[in-house]
């Protein structure tokens, strides 16, 4: 059983966070959004692993790091369905889901080329006006846009 | 946080009414010394002579002084300076900044970084809230109220920034709207949804004649521009349909007033100008009083 092997890898982490069952194409985007390159602790990234559930998958294991809700909410635009397992003393003590925040700061780019955020060195800022439909409203140019159409910063 | 005036969208009914009442006081007595010793900057990154003159007249009539530029080509933004740096620099000199910019959201951003209040004098296709306030003032003044009016918006309802802002500002006052436009320039869906969400009644028309406007209290005309059409055959077909002529006013209400944000090209025939129902030139004049009120409000000055 392939799953079992992954679980063994999960269990091998003493303390930290495991994100499993990531669609392969999202692995590096998630790594970037969580700013893993800035960490000093061990990070294991699995890419294109075989999964019975979703074909190919990715896994990210981060030792000694527990992400805040704010950090996790950064994933809501591209990977709303991933689950983070919190590991303490080799056990999964908590599973955290991605919660869509009310506001997105510096995560996605405004699709309006005439928006000030695309022409000035500044951070973007969106209000999430409809979480179900994924409607975002730019705080600056006030244009509404769907999250499936926006690009990451 | 300074008190800026950036958008019409978040103004409460009470706030709108108090600004209109202040404007009425300035109309009674437009020349004062309220801004004695104050310096107001007018930063026009995009030229707009009409709006700039209106703001600068307002400052001058209140005894303040004006610094600024009327074109981005003569400002440091042509050297590649960021908006933030320009605002920070001017914020050191002036007590308030009036700005117009071609980029959408520029005024909001400026209000977040500026040490002094910002008045948005237009940010691209987004907002032009002082225009909306003078439209409201003109309606209030000519009808005696903003409540329960029949308001007819005519012409380019798709790209017309002023009609969209007016629509949103009127949500507090139970209006009955009529949208009169060619199909290509019809009111966009997002604003019709906005109407439904805020309980605003509206009827759509494509024809524009004496009968359609018989019950109008306010006729708000806008320009149908050739460059807005993808189908030029369609433009040729409709270009003369949305022109208001004096003989169309025969059966209309006595209290009807015709508004237009100006500049007018040919959408209002010049024979309408002599009608007592034509109000577009006084409307522009009202901009002065409204802007006097806005400047004082942003500076926290309560003039009686």
Image (tube, coloured by chain):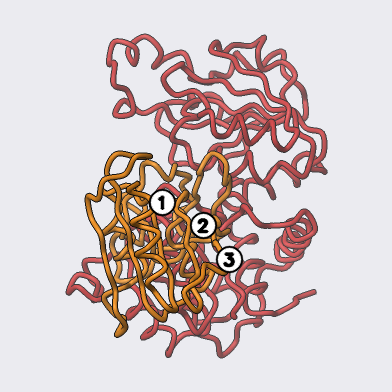
Chain colours: A orange, B red
Q: Earlier in the sequence, mark 1 or mark 2?
A: 1
Which of these two is toward me, A117 or B25? A117
Whether tag 1 and tag 2 are in contact, CB under 8 A, the answer is yes
Q: Is residue B180 left or right of residue A5?
A: right
Which residue in the protein does label 3 denote?
A: B5
Which of these two is toward me, B219 or A128? A128
- Please check whether the numbered discs 1 and 2 fall on a single chain: yes
Q: Residue at x 28, y 62 (%)?
A: A119
Chain under numbered label 1: A
Nearest to viewer (mark 3 / mark 1): 1
- Please check whether the numbered discs 3 and 2 fall on a single chain: no
Which of these two is toward me, B230 or B280? B230
Q: Could you say where residue A124 lies in the image, as x and y percent from the top left?
A: 40, 63
Position of residue B133 relative to residue B155, above or below, is: below
Q: Label for residue A79? A: 1
Which of these two is toward me, A121 or A80? A80
């Amino acid at each position: 059983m392939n799953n079992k092997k992954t679980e063994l890898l999960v269990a091998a982490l003493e303390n930290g966070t495991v994100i499993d069952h990531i669609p392969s194409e999202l692995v590096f985007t998630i790594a970037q959004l969580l700013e893993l390159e800035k960490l000093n602790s061990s990070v294991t990234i699995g890419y294109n692993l075989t999964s019975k559930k979703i074909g190919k998958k990715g896994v990210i294991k981060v030792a000694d790091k527990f992400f805040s809700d704010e950090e996790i909410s950064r994933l809501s635009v591209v990977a709303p369905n991933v689950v983070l397992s919190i590991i303490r003393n080799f056990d999964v003590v908590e599973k955290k889901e991605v919660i869509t925040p009310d506001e997105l700061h510096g995560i996605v780019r405004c699709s309006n080329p005439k928006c000030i955020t695309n022409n000035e060195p500044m951070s973007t800022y969106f209000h999430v006006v409809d979480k179900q439909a994924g409607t975002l409203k730019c705080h600056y140019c006030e244009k509404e846009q769907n999250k499936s159409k926006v690009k990451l910063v | 946080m300074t008190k800026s005036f950036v958008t019409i969208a978040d103004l409460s009914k009470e706030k709108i009414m108090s600004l209109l009442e202040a404007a009425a006081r300035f109309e009674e007595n437009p020349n004062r010394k309220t801004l004695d010793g104050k310096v107001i900057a007018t930063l026009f990154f995009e030229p707009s002579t009409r709006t700039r003159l209106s703001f600068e007249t307002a400052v001058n009539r209140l005894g303040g002084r004006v610094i600024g530029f009327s074109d981005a080509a003569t400002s440091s933004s042509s050297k590649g300076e960021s908006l933030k740096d320009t605002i920070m620099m001017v914020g050191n000199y002036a007590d308030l900044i009036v700005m117009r910019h071609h980029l959408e959201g520029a005024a909001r951003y400026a209000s977040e970084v500026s040490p002094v209040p910002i008045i948005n004098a237009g940010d691209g296709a987004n907002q032009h809230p002082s225009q909306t306030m003078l439209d409201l003032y003109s309606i209030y003044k000519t009808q005696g109220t903003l409540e329960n009016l029949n308001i007819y918006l005519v012409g380019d309802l798709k790209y017309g920034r002023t009609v969209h802002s007016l629509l949103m500002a009127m949500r507090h006052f139970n209006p009955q709207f009529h949208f009169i436009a060619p199909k290509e320039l019809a009111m966009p869906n997002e604003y019709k949804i906005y109407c439904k969400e805020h309980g605003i009644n509206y009827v759509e028309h494509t024809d524009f004649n004496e009968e359609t406007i018989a019950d109008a209290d306010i006729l708000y005309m806008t320009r149908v521009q050739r460059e807005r059409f993808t189908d030029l055959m369609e433009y040729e077909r409709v270009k003369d349909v949305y022109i208001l002529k004096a003989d169309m006013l025969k059966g209309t209400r006595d209290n009807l007033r015709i508004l237009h944000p100006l500049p007018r090209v040919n959408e209002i025939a010049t024979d309408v100008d002599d009608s007592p129902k034509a109000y577009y030139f006084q409307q522009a004049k009202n901009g002065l009083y409204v802007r006097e009120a806005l400047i004082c409000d942003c500076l926290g000055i309560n003039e009686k």
